[in-house]
Amino acid sequence: MSNYYFKPVVGIDISQGFHVVSILNPMSKLHTKTFKIYNTLDGFSYLLSEIEKVEREYNMKTAIFMESTGVYHLSLFHFLKKQNLEVNLINPLVTNSNKNKDIRKVKNDKKDSFSIAKLAQLDDIKYSSYFDLDVFNIKSLCREYYKHVDTRSSYKRKLSADIHVLFPNYNHVFKNITCDTSISILKKYPTPSRLLAADSEAVVELIKATSKKGLKWATNIYNKLKNVALDAIEIGIPSISLELRISLNLNIIETLDKNLKSILNEIKSMVNSNDFPQYLKNCIEFVDSIPGFDFFSAVTILAEIGDYRRFKKPKQLIAFLGLDPGVNESGKFKGDKNSMSKRGSKTARRALYSAALVSIRKKRNGEYFNPVLFTYFHENLVNKKTKIALGAIMHKLVNYIFSVLRDQKNYELRSPKLHNQMFLNNKSKQCA
């Protein structure tokens, strides 16, 4: 049974420019006719006055429920939070699954707001009331960073395709065609003919200055470029449109690189400021201490998790991040091809996936980032596919994250044997 049974409940259906509100009395009946409020201060104030009327009439505090709908719920949610009201967010997956209780095919905002209120009042559902402005700001910047990375990748692919037609085999000289040296060459000499017509000493000097390497290396790169350009004159397609596209894409990529640096600097500035909560700073340091994580991935994970104290067990955190397995069973049938549910934050999973890849690698000095996870990964590879083995590493990392946040201390590398021994010792102390 719901915690809000026989209490007044407000259900709000969120839209971009307006919201539809249904208020239920303790008897699960509409207290007043469902009404619409606009996303303005006047609209929000009118909602407050209606809530106050209900609370005075029944001498009870109301609970407000709304769907977590993109960014459109944030203004109203934050406004109501500032009024010290109990405001809760429901996952749209929960409300959508309950909207089909009625076999009639009716779908409108009034019915949706009423369904949200009734669902919250009568059913025991999962909801969230967590909102921290510092976490929200960091999360927004982290997600924007990843969006910029994805946009930059798409323009890199476009640039690579255009160069392949205009300047074939250029990528044989520069494996990364968007490195500083390559960009400086392409901006000044975007076509094979321009490169061949240029003064060789000027090109070598440009390569040397940009790469910050010696004259011998720069001369070798120039000779390779010259040979590729001679071939490209014969097999490439001289196109003014491609030349323009290459120039435009280079400018966009450079702008995106500057934006990425600005975002990362802003995140560091926010975290290091005196106004940023100390407990969040500590949590970032604890996650950063886990091999495979760096500052940015640790910040991303903390921003997506929010208040770690909401999770009592590692399995709850695993499910929150969408790493729990999807189950497909019916009668005697049991599905054996289960995959991750992926119901949580894809940004957090992305950061975890990157950390998992790093944690099973070798450092330049030949040591492993995390020898325990490296061994565990290769043990799984014996009878599992690579992606499944990486998923297991991500599970381990979430367990590590939960432990360092719960214990509020840095990560300590322990072998499975030592870990089991410590577990047994703690068990024996509890029994004694």
Image (cartoon, rainbow, N blue to C red):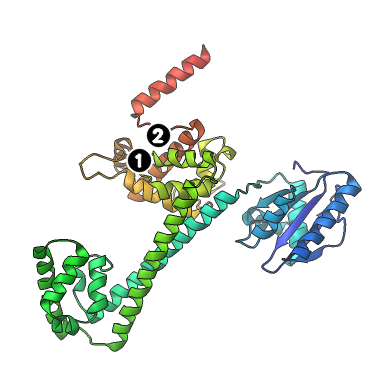
Image position of 194 (left or right of 290): left
Packing grade of label 2 (10 A; few <14, some 14-19, many >=20) is some
Q: Give the percent coordinates (x, y) of residue 296.
A: 42, 50
- Labels 2 & 1 near each other (Cβ < 8 A): yes
Which of the two residues, 333 or 185, is positioned nearer the viewer here?
Answer: 185
Q: Where, quadrant-wise, is the N terminus in this rendering?
A: top right
Q: Nearer the viewer, residue 94 or 279?
A: 279
Q: Is residue 243 above or below residue 128?
A: below
The Cα–Cα distance between marks 2 and 1, rounded to whole angstroms, is 8 Å
Query: In the displayed structure, does residue 248 sit left or right of residue 56?
Result: left
Residue located 55% across and 40% down the image: 308
In the displayed structure image, the side of residue 21 where residue 178 appears, left or right: left
- Quadrant position of residue 111: bottom right
Residue 420 shows in the view: yes
What mark, if any, has residue 199 been given in the picture? none
Residue 120 x/y as whole percent: 74, 49
Q: Residue furthest right?
A: 57
Amino acid residing under circle 2: Tyr
Residue sitting farthest toward the top: 432
Q: Quadrant of residue 248?
A: bottom left
Residue under label 2: 411
Residue 59 against residue 248 in the figure, above or below: above
When the figure is inspected, residue 7 is found, relative to residue 182, above or below; the finding is: above
Q: Secondary structure at mark 1?
A: loop
User: Residue at (53%, 38%) from the top-left corner?
Assistant: 279
SS for callout 2: loop
- Of 285 and 427, nearer the camera is 285
**Which of the labelled discs sits on residue 291, or is there none?**
1
Which amino acid type is shown beneath numbered disc 1? Pro
Question: Is residue 173 something that shows in the picture?
Answer: no
Label 1 packing within 10 angstroms: few (<14), some (14-19), many (20+): many
